[in-house]
Amino acid sequence: MNKIKAIVCAYNEERTIEKVVATVADYFFDEVFIVDDGSTDKTDSILKRISKYYSFQHIVLYENKGKGYAMATGLQNATGDIVVFIDADLSNLQEGHFLKLIAPVKNNEADMVLGQPTETLINYHINPFKSFTGQRCLLRKDIMPIIEKMKETRFGVETLINLYYRSEGKKVKYIMLPGLIHPAKFDKTSSSKAMEEFIREGHQIVATALDNFNLIAKTIFNKFN
């Protein structure tokens, strides 16, 4: 029987972390890991408080290492066959969303499932950023070969994972997560700071793609051979 683990990585998500953890912890996951990536707000204190009521492993990184490092840390501690990643800043997260993410992997219909919140500004079918979603399910054994690379990517981690899966010929499935809300950066902070974050994250994504051009080349080679 496949064991299923959930990993939630959080950085300064005091507004949403409690509800997200409560929903994840109430599901039938065999184990839940919450990785606090050096938060400077009340995220850590909230996690400590709710640990009395919900069952989860609380991992604290005492300085901000970036999303890639936090995800890799969760993977290193998880031992399950199937891993589900969930963002910490979601609203209206429901147990049905987990079922939709897990079922295709569990039934061998896909190697990785990417879930897209429906409540976004850009229509899912034309959204050029849908592959960057933080809601994804995959087999732990498939992603472990790039775990050390993940630590260096920060917000380029989804780019690395996507490139690697394509280069390995893995089957990726996109699904809708009805009613799920993922806030835009402009909803979470000032316009100027949101723009700064966009630029910084864009740089990290491009840098990750350039650093892993061999994966792009391998994908192209496999396509035409």
Image (cartoon, rainbow, N blue to C red):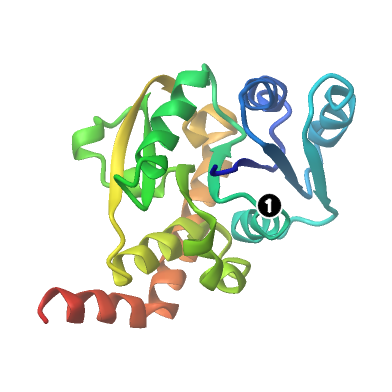
Query: Within 10 angstroms of label 1, few (less than 14), some, or many (20 or more) residues?
Result: many
> In the rendered view, does 135 fall on the left or right side of 114?
right
Is 213 rendered above or below residue 160?
below
| Residue 104, position as x, y percentages in the image | 35, 39
Q: Which residue is drawn at 62% across and 33% down?
A: 29
Name the residue rendered at 73%, 28% in the picture.
Answer: 14
| Quadrant hosting residue 153 | bottom right
Which residue is painted at 62% across and 49% down in the image? 80
Is residue 36 shown left or right of residue 191? right
The quarter of the rendered structure image containing the C terminus is bottom left
The type of residue carrying mark 1 is Ala
The answer to whether residue 108 is above or below residue 215 is above
- In the image: residue 121, left or right of residue 33: left
The part of the image, by quadrant, that contains residue 107 is top left
Residue 82 in picture, x, y percent from top left: 53, 47
Identify which residue, 183 or 194, lies in the foreground.
183
Quarter of the image where the N terminus is located: top right
Q: Tell how many labels.
A: 1
The residue nearer to you, when weighing 201 against 43, is 43
Q: Mark 1 points at which residue?
A: 78
Using residue 106 as the reference point, say whether residue 130 is left or right of it: left
Residue 6 appears in the picture as rendered: yes
Location of residue 102 in the rendering, given as x and y in whole percent from the top left corner: 44, 36
